[in-house]
Amino acid sequence: MQTRTRAALKDDAETIAAIYNEGIAERSSTFETDPRSAAEVLAWLGSDRQPVLVAAAAGSPAGWARVALYSPRPCYAGVGEASVYVASAHRGRGIGRELAVELVAAAERAGYHKLVGKLFTDNEASRRLVARLGFREVGTHLRHSRLDGHWRDVVLVELLLGDAAAA
């Protein structure tokens, strides 16, 4: 299936929320437990500083990616937190990789010097993806939070960009 990665549009909000809600329900990639609405997704859109991308397959988003602020503190203005979600029906087709590659490029254009992420330690697919893109595993937060009453560990990953990568 041919995909095309592009900036997310307001019309994509409902599908982005549905893909995220699928990830929330699966309990394999986020501590979030409450479904997201299209209105919440709309609040993410329109910022050059916090890009949101979709990979469109047959005209409809099959996955999305975004850079969120790591911290509101000015000293961390160049650090973004990356997220990539692919609809279950489209997984295993390279869409996550395509989104992640384009998200890294968008983050560099937006002036970030580092992307970070937190992955569940047992989320092997995501760990393989970020490793292939050059992310480095920094360490593990043990019992980072509870999900459905069970402690979950997360591995921290980072990717240096631009002049930080060249230094």
Image (cartoon, rainbow, N blue to C red):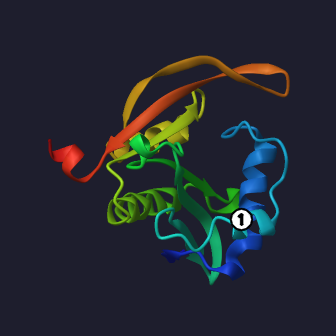
* SS state under label 1: helix
- Quarter of the picture holding the N terminus: bottom right
Residue topped by disc 1: 41
x, y percentage for residue 68?
Answer: 55, 53
x, y percentage for residue 15?
Answer: 74, 70
For the point 72% across and 49% down, the residue is 23
Furthest residue in direction top, as rendered:
142
- Mark 1: amino acid: Val
For the point 42% across and 49% down, the residue is 77
Q: Quadrant of residue 37?
A: bottom right
Q: Residues within 10 Å of mark 1 (few under 14, many from 20)?
A: some
Q: Is residue 66 left or right of residue 135?
A: right
For the point 63% across and 68% down, the residue is 62
Q: Is residue 24 left or right of residue 58?
A: right
Tell me: residue 64, above or below residue 165.
below
- Quarter of the picture holding the C terminus: top left
